[in-house]
Each structure stands twice: as C-alpha cells, then as structure tokens.
Image (cartoon, rainbow, N blue to C red):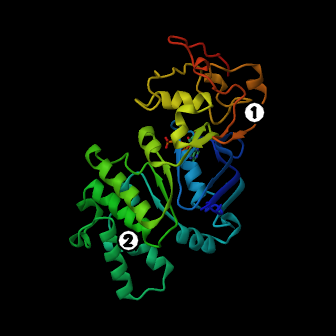
Amino acid sequence: MTEQRRDPLAELSGVSVEHRAPGGSVFNRARVHALTAADLTVAPGETLGVVGESGCGKSTLVKVLVGLQPPTRGTVRLAGEDIWSLSTSRRRRHVGGLVGMVFQDPATSLNRRLSVEQIIADPLDVQGRRSPRDRRDRVTELMDLVGLPASAREALPPQMSGGQRQRVAIARALALEPALLVADEPTSALDVSVRAQILNLLLDLRTRLGLAMVFVSHDLQTVRRVSDRIVTMYLGRVVEELPADRIRYGRHPYTQALFSAAPGLLNPMRPIPLTGPVPSAVRPPSGCPFRTRCWRSTDVCATEMPPYATDADGRFRCFHPITDPSDLPRAGADSVQELT
Ligand SMILES: Nc1ncnc2c1ncn2[C@@H]1O[C@H](COP(=O)(O)OP(=O)(O)OP(=O)(O)O)[C@@H](O)[C@H]1O
C-alpha cells in the first residue's frame, strides 16, 4: 500500500521573532534576533526533534508554534489555519484543541495552589461544554492514562514528587485530545532516576494516542532515539533538517560538531572543537551565522547566506557541506577563522 501524503499539522513559513535587546529602549533599537526566517512542518503522527546550543532559538520556535509568542514576520499554520490571523479567543480555542504543551519544569508550570483535579480540568473548563460528571470522569481517565493514583486527586503540586508533577502536566496537556504534543525539555528538570520513566510515558502515549510530537532537548541521544526527523538550529536559524537515523551523515558542519560531542552517536568520532568567537543574536554575523566558528569557512561565507540545498536526506544551508570524513577537522586541528 502506498502511503498517502498528509497535510502538515503544523507549518512555519518564513517565521522571524525579534525582541528588544535587554536594556534597549525606544531610543535604542537594538534587537535580539531570536528566530530568523524559520520554515518547517510537522506531519500528523511524526516526531520532530529540535536541537542546538543554548540561546539558538529552540524555545522561541516552540512558543511561536503554540501561539504563545507572536512572530515579527511569517506565518504559523496549525491544521491549515493561520493562527496569528485569528482573534485572541479563536486562536486560543483553535490551538488549545490541537496542541498540548509540556514545559521543562513542572514546579513552575503548575499553579501550586490548585489541586491535581483542578489543574487537569482547567483546559476542560476553559473549553466549557462539560457536565460536572463528565469533567470528573475525564479527569479520572487522564490520571489513569498518565499513571497517577486516584489518591492524588486532591493533592497540591508542592506535595508531589517532580516525576508526579510532570505526570500532572502531561495529563493537562492531553485533556483536550490534542493531535500534537510539544515537549520543551520535558525531563531535564527531573531527577535522573525518573527521567526514563517520564520519557517512556511520553513515548507510550505517543503510540497509544497517535500523537505528533515536537521534542526539544539538549540530550542528543534521546532526541536521536525519539525523533523521526531532527532540525538543527544555530543562532536563530534552522541550518539543517534530516531523518534521525541519518544524523551521522549531517552535512552542516554545525550538525557534525554538535553531535560529535554526544558520546556514541557518531562513533568513533571525537568531539570537534569549536574555538572561534561565539556570535551575538543582537548583531549576527553577515553571511552564514556559523562562519565565525566553522573550520570550513571561506570568503563567500562572510558575504552570502547559503540557500537551502534539498535532497532525499533533507535540507541544509552551507556552502561547504560535509560529504566525506576528510571534511572533518583533523585531530588537534582548530584552525577556525577569527572573524566577527
Ligand atoms: N523576551 C525576550 N527578550 C529578549 N531576548 C530574548 C527573549 N526571549 C528570548 N530571548 C533571546 O532570544 C534568543 C533565543 O532564546 P531561546 O530561549 O529561544 O533559546 P533556546 O535555544 O531555547 O535556549 P535554551 O536552550 O537555553 O533554553 C536568546 O539570545 C535569548 O537571550
């Protein structure tokens, strides 16, 4: 049977987000380029992993996707609807019915004064239309789904462990039967001992409920394991997108450098040192944003932004892609251009 091509559940087209730089005022127009011209799609049922170093724009991408951050430019479509063309109330309803969001730290993402029942039922109450009995039954069903004991119903978040709190957050995210679950570092604030349990719960729910997922994490091993496709971000830009099982063949030097630091993933490669200046999101370099730290950078990289090259393995934007092991830096080499 041939697979039918399905319309994307989520689609970002040319999305940029700029913030006023800290300390900036109406007289000082410095901007932080948190996200620049991002294009990507998430198909029903697929998991998209998002990776990149701290500050590269992962959380901004997620916020813009789930309607928490308006784009400065570009379009965000969920199930075909341009969410930022909708009124606030219609946007909330549309996004709320399609997307569930799990944040990094349940200690701060849950209201500590509300009971588990109140937290999980909150999205149901916002949507309305439920009798008290329906509401109670749905909360019971959701607690069961995420492995919370019935006795936790009246508990407050501070009375629970981190793992249990994250189960509450997941139950709340699933309350309106979303098609897409967006998880931004869902296990990194948890004790190491419960991380695997929460990750396995997410994967189990994904399968049982047929969810699509956007999974943001610094844990590259986990991203590699859970994702169908991975996007690599650098300084607010999507620089590469490829199937998770092709990650060792990343063409962008930054993808190679990032994953070379994750033990075992690109085995037997050693970590690639990046020694050039780390650029600022307030004044991104001209041309390719990675050129100040890239061992393959040449003059053209300083003058032009590489366009996307697309093939069966995905897409990347680099004038000097890695196509052969000899394109990687030699042991001990750190000949990175000192450009600003
Ligand atoms: N409200 C804001 N005002 C000013 N700058 C911001 C704001 N939010 C984010 N930024 C900046 O935008 C850039 C992208 O931030 P973002 O939080 O999206 O990165 P990230 O990849 O999620 O980082 P991390 O992995 O550390 O969470 C950073 O330079 C950050 O300092």
Q: Which mark is residue 120?
A: 2
Residue 122 appearing in the image: yes
Q: Extreme left residue here?
A: 151
Secondary structure beneath label 1: loop
Q: Which mark is residue 217?
A: none
Q: Quadrant of the C terminus?
A: top right
Q: Quadrant of residue 203?
A: bottom left
Instruction: Please give the name of the residue rendered at 64% of the width and 29% of the height, measured from the top-left corner.
Output: 290
Q: Position of residue 222 (x, y in %)?
A: 42, 43
Reading the image, the residue beneath label 1 is: 305
Residue 111 appearing in the image: no
Q: Extreme top residue here?
A: 332
Left or right of 75: which side holds 274?
A: left
At label 2, counting other C-alpha atoms closer than 10 Å, the crowd grade (few under 14, some 14-19, many 20 or more) is many
Q: Nearer the viewer, residue 296 or 90?
A: 296
Residue type, numbered disc 2? Ile
Q: Nearer the viewer, residue 325 or 239?
A: 325
| Above or below: residue 134 compared with residue 110 | below
| Above or below: residue 122 compared with residue 40 | below
| Above or below: residue 307 compared with residue 125 | above
Say which of marks 2 and 1 sits in front. Answer: 1
Q: Position of residue 40 (x, y in %)?
A: 65, 51
Q: Position of residue 220 (x, y in %)?
A: 45, 38
Residue type, numbered disc 1? Met
